[in-house]
Amino acid sequence: MKTNLLHFDAEGLVAFCEQLGEKRFRANQLLRWIHQRGGSDFDAMTDLAKSFRDKLKVHAVVQALPISRCLESADGSIKWLFDVGGGDAIETVFIPEQDRGTLCVSSQAGCAVGCRFCSTGHQGFSRNLGTHEIVAQLWFAEHALRRRFHTGERVISNVVMMGMGEPLQNFAALLPALRLMLDDHAYGLSRRRVTVSTSGVVPMMDRLREECPVALAVSLHAPNDALRDSLVPLNRKYPLEELLDACQRYLLAAPRDFITFEYCLLDGVNDQDQHAHELLARVRQHGESGVACKFNLIPFNPFPGSGLRRSSPDRIQQFVRILSEAGIVTTLRKTRGDDIDAACGQLAGDVQDRTRVHLRMPLHPVHRLEEVAS
Ligand code: SAH
Ligand code: SF4
């Protein structure tokens, strides 16, 4: 069995090189070939000794994931559906903007958290992705986009772990992937430009803070435990008080001086004035100094069988207004890629049909962050 080198961060690759009887510094050379130049053909890595290349050819491979589908939106967003075997598919989305290119990456096939408003949650949990499967999404997207745009320059400037899955329930595989994203010999992204989004796995928020603090987004969705219990079942295990405490601890090491709270607006469920006011009180009055935060409001992206509706545009604006007038920076995610999402909606109708499971796509909306207040 050959080892897929996308599996290794710098430390892992050093160990692998040493196993092959090679010097440590070879690892950095190899990292640059693979991640900066998109190389997968060892013969082309001409500054590596021929003997080393021969060993690599026997023991290693740089292997992307098979693509099941690629959907392109008129607005430039691109969604890839990758086949991860066993009938499972994951999605990766590229969102171009004027000043940045963001890649939305998946961490699991399915998700065990089971949030009510989330299509992935409704599908249930299939399995954790390995580090190589998380990294393969970035490796493939970055180099495919460079070829497409005929550029040698970096295309992806930001990564958000907001695709399928709960990244902090796959911490062991996530950690080396994050390290690679930050490594100057690989993707060299700053910690502020790599965001982990979590539904609130408190102990793992602490691990992330200790081992690899990157920007953090926390999916809040409700201002009190009763409502949050019903939307994000994990809240029963880690209620708001504990979650907000963990946010405050995270801030001590975070590369940004705020936590981004995500809040999916659901018609008549969590989108009333009273919810916005309660939310303000909750984050402002937590602990001695409140939690330094920004809000990112997400209009619900409907899918069949959810039984939920998107809030009206007026309601959304009013919610934004209450938070921003209270002085909290609040952004509204403008849905992008509506046309390709629509295609997903149709595909997701097949959820019961295991034989067509590879055609299913989660329904996380393709978004653009739009600053509405600062
Ligand atoms: N599991 C992590 C990261 C992936 S979900 C988390 O929950 O944070 C990324 C974001 O998309 C989360 O904030 C999630 O709440 C939101 N989301 C999921 N389904 C959605 C839907 N149908 N409409 C709008 N936002 C959704
Ligand atoms: Fe999982 Fe996030 Fe979806 Fe909740 S919103 S089910 S945590 S992917």
Image: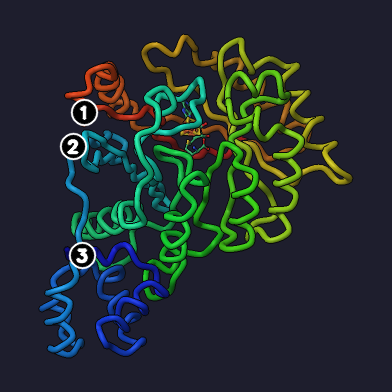
Q: From the viewer's perspective, tell me whether residue 81 is left or right of residue 246.
A: left
Q: Which residue is mark 2?
A: 69
Mark 2 / mark 1, whichever is N-terminal = 2
Mark 3 / mark 1, whichever is N-terminal = 3
Position of residue 232 measured from the top left corner of the image (x, y, whole percent): 58, 26
Q: Quadrant of residue 371?
A: top right
Q: Quadrant of residue 263?
A: top right
The way the protein has been coloured in the rendering is rainbow
Considering the numbered disc 1 on the image, is that residue within a helix, a strand or a loop?
Answer: helix
Mark carried by residue 62: 3
Label 3 amino acid? Val
Position of residue 342 measured from the top left corner of the image (x, y, whole percent): 30, 22
Alpha carbon of mark 3 to alpha carbon of mark 1: how far? 26 Å
Alpha carbon of mark 2 to alpha carbon of mark 1: how far? 8 Å
Alpha carbon of mark 3 to alpha carbon of mark 2: how far? 21 Å
Q: From the viewer's perspective, tell me whether residue 83 is left or right of residue 219.
A: left
Position of residue 173 measured from the top left corner of the image (x, y, whole percent): 42, 55
Q: Count residues near mark 1 (Cα–Cα under 10 Å), then give few for <14, some for 14-19, many for 20+.
A: many
Mark 3 / mark 2, whichever is N-terminal = 3
Q: Count residues near mark 3 (Cα–Cα under 10 Å), then give few for <14, some for 14-19, many for 20+.
A: some
In the image, residue 12 above or below residue 193: below
Please name the residue shown 49% across and 12% down the image.
Answer: 309
Considering the numbered disc 2 on the image, is that residue within a helix, a strand or a loop?
Answer: strand
Considering the numbered disc 3 on the image, is that residue within a helix, a strand or a loop?
Answer: loop
Label 1 amino acid? Leu
Tag nearer the camera, 3 or 2: 3
Please name the residue shown 64% across and 48% down the image.
Answer: 203
Mark carried by residue 359: 1
Mark carried by residue 222: none
In the image, residue 74 above or below residue 5: above
Tag nearer the camera, 2 or 1: 1
Label 2 amino acid? Arg
